Structure formats: structure tokens, C-alpha cells
Image: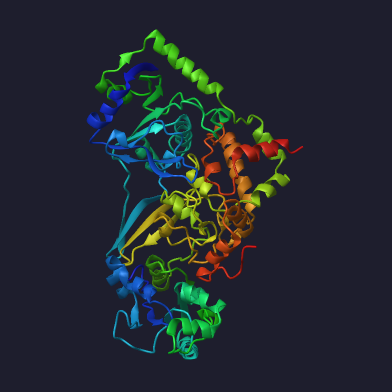
Amino acid sequence: MEYLGIKPNKPKVAVFDFSGCEGCELQLVNKEDTLIDFLSAIDLRGWREASSVINDDYDIALIEGSITRDDEIKRLEKIRSHAKVLVALGSCACFGGVNQMKNVFDLKKANQEVYGDKPKETAKVKAVKDVVKVDLEIPGCPISKAEVESIIRHLAWGMPFSYPVYPVCVECKQRFTTCMFEKGLMCLGPITMAGCNAPCPAGGLGCWGCRGPAKDPNYESFFAIARERGFSTAEVNERLNFFGGFQEVNAK
Amino acid sequence: MIFKTIVKEDLKKLFNVHLKDVECVGPKQVATSNDGKAVYQFLPFESFDEINLNHEKTEYSAKTYFLPFRETLSTFNFKNGDWDQEIKYRKQQRVLVGLHPCDINALVKLDKVFAKDLFPSPYYRSRRENTFVIGIDCDKPCTDGFCASVGADVVTHGFDLFLRDIGDKYFVKVGSDRGLNVLNKISPTDISPEERKSYRKKTKEFLAGFKNTIRVENLPNTLDIEFESPVWKKWGDKCLSCGSCAMVCPTCYCYGVSEQISMDFKKSEKVKQLYSCNLLDFAMVAGAHNFRPARETRLKYRYYHQHRGFVESFGEPKCVGCNRCGRACLANINPVDVISDLQMEL
């Protein structure tokens, strides 16, 4: 397709998985109504969940998962050297995700707890940006496919792309969800970046902050509100530490 | 104005029999709050029994049926190097029942902006004209409302029918021709002298029952003088900049427009999204300059629009005193406290 004499780019995209559940990759193939259009808009160079193509010539590398072993570091560095743009896909890649909860435990004990007497090689969990330069982060557990699509449209046609700066509350309100705090539940919505369309509160579960902080969140006020409503510092911190997106802050 | 009375059972009949083929929206309970109170929202219903006209106040305003949070303004289809534009206005009939004086006065204010001002919005007008509004007076003032302070406790127009519960009957104010036509389906009776008395007595009791009052006559001047007041920082420091106040507000109408292209690149939509002046990038302009980077500034300007800017344009505050913003605010920022604070700043 050509419009006003301008031809779209067809970005060469490859998807790579590291330590994670591969749920974000699954999200990429999940939105069936636009899947064909999505795949037509890109030049797929490698994505084991969707294609048998393997090719080292790619411009955009989508990295899923956190980094937990030395061989992963080497592999990631190699991908970085090939890619023009490296994208961290999902909360694991962006912040370490659920995996990084391991970091507060003794590594040996953690290993034993999971693998018993057959220990595996494991290191402290790192986000992708702790290992190589990241050009773009798409947070979320899982990611929102709509957001990935808008990034692909940006790459193909130069359509403007931006994340919401506001917190999840806006999206809860815009889908008429009764506030979790009103129901007596803990929720990180007021400090977490929107863009997910607030599915968790709509389903009755307070926000766990998988997308990390909104821009310029008012932590002090939020902590005061949580305290007034009877939530302990430990409870708040447990939430903040769950996906690793709030490493910049902890409730006192 | 024509006044009639109807027996309560007949109102049910009106919905379940005469309006059964039209989309009807009313106050439905959606949840129970932590302190045991019923939470209501204006939602579509099939049977009259699903709604409760004795609801205190809905969590969200009825604004969404006139200014939806998201609305496609136009669709562009690209083909053969050219494009065509498609615009759709919502024309389906809808009945909205259970609106309180604050809700109806909010619509009257929105009418001034979107139907009667220099540039009427066809999107708004189409929804407004195709919505049949049945309001109902509050039995007593709600615990936190201050509608009486901003002149929104009484309705005189902006509805098709307006009810007041006078015991075994509803006293009905008829606000339009179509209102009378609909009312005639359930054989209303002319009001008796006793019913008139009973209505006026109930209204008087309601108007005398307000506990939350603020004086707003001089507020535009006070706001001007107190532009640099430390009160703004005090409340601004609490503000989460989450926009919840504007989302639940029956009159907040600020919005942003974006173009969204489909994944097959064959279609584009111009989408309007209601926004809030408390959100960080509300006053962000090209080149990423932000005119209002501080929370307190954004909060202040919300109060300025409500109680100063709107007064300048329309001779009345934009606020209808429902305090939905105060209820929705986790930080407990509410107009009565903020304005009282400002007025005491001496």
C-alpha cells in the first residue's frame, strides 16, 4: 500500500524469549481479529511461537523475559549487536517481573526450594536494561497487544505513538469500575501507568502495578491514603515489589 | 408548567408496558461499599424492578449518555489513493430516569456549552434531543451535597418529566410536549389542592434540610485575589493527579482528540476521549512544554474553571454541588473544604 506517494516501512522483526512464561509472546498471537494484518505489516525474522523462520538479519528485536543466567547475558548481547532497535517486552523484560522476587532470598536456598537436589544454574534476576541498552519498554503482565500494534504502526508509517502519562484510575473510571478502595481492597491503580484498560479492577482485583509507575506519581499522598485505610507498610511494599516496577520507591 | 399526579404503580406500568421497546436507563445497584452502603450507577434496565428511584446518588453522573468517555467523531476510509469520511451521530431513542436536580442542572449547563453556544456540537445535540429525561426530586439532601449553595437544588427546565414522591403518588412536573404525550399513556390526574400543598411542604422541608453550605457569590473575586494562596499547595500536595474527579463530574467536559489508524492501514478514526485538567500532560503543548507541571497548579485551575471561568462565560458556576468528585477522591479533596479553606485564608 502506498499513500500520497509514501510507502510504509516493513520493519524486520524478531522475537526472543528469555526467562519468563512466554505469556507476552502468546499475547502477540492472541488478538486474532488483527493477527493477519499485524503479521502483514512486519517482516518476520524469527519468532518460535509463531513461525519456523530463523534469520539474524533484523532491525527490531522484541525481548521477552528476564535475565537469570550467564548464557542469557551472552545471547542478549549478541541480539543487541544485530538489532537497530531493542524492545523490552513485558514486565519481566522491563523490570525483572515476578522472577525478581527471588532476589531477596539466598540464591542457594531458592534454588533448592525449586529444584531440590537437582540444582540449576541461576543468578540474580536482571531486567533487560541492566544488561544491554534498551530503546523502548512495553511493560505489562501480560503486555497489551494493542500497544504493540500501535508501535508497529509507528514504525511502519511514522504514526505518533505515546504511552499514557496518567494512572490506571482514569481507565477504571472510564469503564465505570467501582473503586477498589471503596470496596476495602488494596490497589496500586493511583500510581501505576495506565494503558492496560484496567482489566484487574474490573474483575474485582486491585491493581498490582505490572506496568510500573505512571509519570510523576504522588507516592507520599498514596502511602498516606493506604495507611489511613488500614493497609500496613508491609502490605503496600509487597505490592510494590511484586513485579519490580516500583524499585524507585518503598512505603515507610 | 403543567402539573399532574400519578399513582406510583402507574410509573412501573409506564416502563414495563409503554416504554418496553425503548432503551431505558436508571439507577441500578452495582456494588456495596466497604461501609455497607449501596453503590448505584445509571445503567440500562429491562424491568422497572431493577432500578431504585430512592437511590441517594449515583457513583457516576449521567453525563456519559451525552458525552461518552470515548466517542468516534469520524471514520476515514482510504481507497485508491483517495479517502472518504463517515460521520455517525447517535440517534437511537433512550429514556433516562432517576436524575436528581444536580444531574438535570448539569445537563442544563452542558446544553449551554454544547447546544446553545457559538459552536453547537451535533454529537451532543443528537444524543440530548433523542434522550427522554425523567427526573426525581431528592427526598432529603444527601449527606455531602451542597447543590443549594450553587443554585442546583431546584430544577425549572431541562427535563421532560420531573417527579416528587408525595407519599402514595408522584407529583409530576411536565417539562415538554413529548413529556405530556408520554405521561398521558398512564392517565395522570389533575392535582388537588391537598396534593399541591403536600408537594410544596415536601419541597420546603427539602430546601431547609441542607447542612453543607458554602457561599459562592463572591468566589470568582476570591479566586482572583487568592491566586498565590498557600491553600493550593496544601490541597495540591494531596492530589494524586488521577483525574477521578473530572471523570465522575456531571459537568466536566474537557477532552482530547486522537487519530487511530487500523492495523490493516485502510481505515482511520478520529476519537474523542474525555480528559481531566488534573492529569499531568493536560497543558502540554508542542515541543513538550508543560504550562502546568505542578499538581497544585492543575488542581487550582480545575477550581478556576468550575467557579470562575464558567461564571465569566455563562453567569453561573459550572459546579452543581453533587460532591461526586469529593466522594471519588481518595485524598478527600472536596469542594466544600477547599473553598472554605480559601475563604478563611485571611
Find the residue positioned furthest to the top.
B193
Query: Depth check: B307 or A182 in front?
Result: A182
Picture coordinates of residue B54 (x, y %)? 41, 30
| Residue A132 in sight | no
Find the residue positioned furthest to the front.
A117
Vertical placement of residue B272 versus B152, above or below: below
Vertical placement of residue B260 versus A18, above or below: above
> In the image, B307: left or right of B244?
right
Query: Depth check: A79 or A227 in front?
Result: A227
Query: Depth check: A47 or B306 in front?
Result: A47
Q: How many marks?
A: 0
Query: Based on the displayed image, in which of its 4 quarters is residue B264 positioned?
Result: bottom left
| Residue A27 in sight | yes
User: Which quarter of the image is occupied by the N terminus of chain B?
Assistant: top left
Query: Depth check: A206 or B99 in front?
Result: A206
User: Which quarter of the image is occupied by the C terminus of chain B?
Assistant: top right
Query: Based on the displayed image, in which of its 4 quarters is residue B145 positioned?
Result: top right
Picture coordinates of residue A62 (x, y %)? 42, 79
Query: Based on the displayed image, in which of its 4 quarters is residue A53 positioned?
Result: bottom left
Picture coordinates of residue A213 (x, y %)? 54, 64
Picture coordinates of residue B177 (x, y %)? 32, 23
Question: How is the protein colored in the picture?
Answer: rainbow
Vertical placement of residue B118 versus A230, above or below: above
Find the residue positioned furthest to the right.
B346
